[in-house]
Image (cartoon, rainbow, N blue to C red):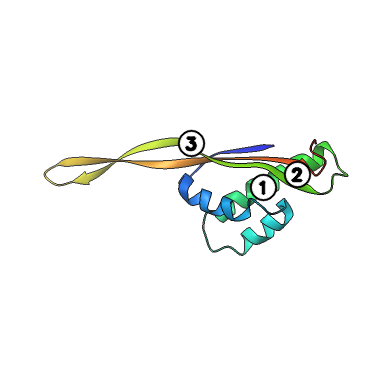
Amino acid sequence: MHIQKNIHTSPRKLRLVADMVRGMSPDKAVVALQFTQKSAALPLAKAIQTALANAKNTNPNLEGLIFKSLEVNEGLRMKRMRAAGRSHRQPYQRKTSQIKVILTDVKGVI
């Protein structure tokens, strides 16, 4: 299991890429993300690689891992201001994301 927090990409953009790899095995997902043109593919690939490393540290001869869950949730929102007309300001929010990757073996339990 791995949780990557405060990724400076909106959750909607990350969910598009996560939906693409959700049915694959984690090894194939990392390879597919390397050739994806979306900028959200890099943080997702890093989170999957970290989850794979964590799983192999707990059980080194583990083969046939699959995704139990791959969630992209909304993280913190950074509140910012933008200059507007007549000496006013316009508020906006920069969204961040959290990726939660849980892997399991084919038998069901790590």
Query: What's the residue at 84%, 48% (across, down)?
Result: 63
Residue type at tag 2: Ala
Question: For residue 83, what is the image quadrant?
Answer: top left
Judged from the image, the secondary structure of the residue bearing numbered disc 3 is strand
Distance from disc 3 to disc 2, alpha carbons, whole Å, reads 24 Å
Q: Residue furthest right?
A: 61
Residue for badge 3: 75
Question: For residue 50, what is the image quadrant?
Answer: top right
Residue type at tag 1: Ile
- Tag of residue 1: none
Query: What's the residue at 54%, 64% (across, down)?
Result: 37
Q: How many marks?
A: 3
Q: Earlier in the sequence, mark 3 or mark 2?
A: 2
Residue for badge 1: 48
Between marks 1 and 2 in the image, the one whose residue lies nearer the viewer: 1
Q: Is residue 40 above or below residue 35?
A: above
Q: Is residue 59 left or right of residue 14?
A: right
Query: What's the residue at 57%, 55% (across, down)?
Result: 41
* Category of crowding for the residue at label 2, using alpha-carbon neighbours closer than 10 angstroms: few (below 14), some (14–19), many (at least 20): some
**Viewer can see residue 9:** no
Distance from disc 1 to disc 2, alpha carbons, whole Å, reads 9 Å
Q: Is residue 70 left or right of residue 37?
A: right
- Tag of residue 53: 2
Question: For residue 30, what is the image quadrant?
Answer: bottom right
Percent across and percent down for residue 91 are: 27, 39
| Tags 3 and 2 touching, CB below 8 Å | no
* Category of crowding for the residue at label 1, using alpha-carbon neighbours closer than 10 angstroms: few (below 14), some (14–19), many (at least 20): many
| Tags 1 and 2 touching, CB below 8 Å | no
Q: Earlier in the sequence, mark 1 or mark 3?
A: 1
Q: Residue furthest left?
A: 86
* Category of crowding for the residue at label 3, using alpha-carbon neighbours closer than 10 angstroms: few (below 14), some (14–19), many (at least 20): some
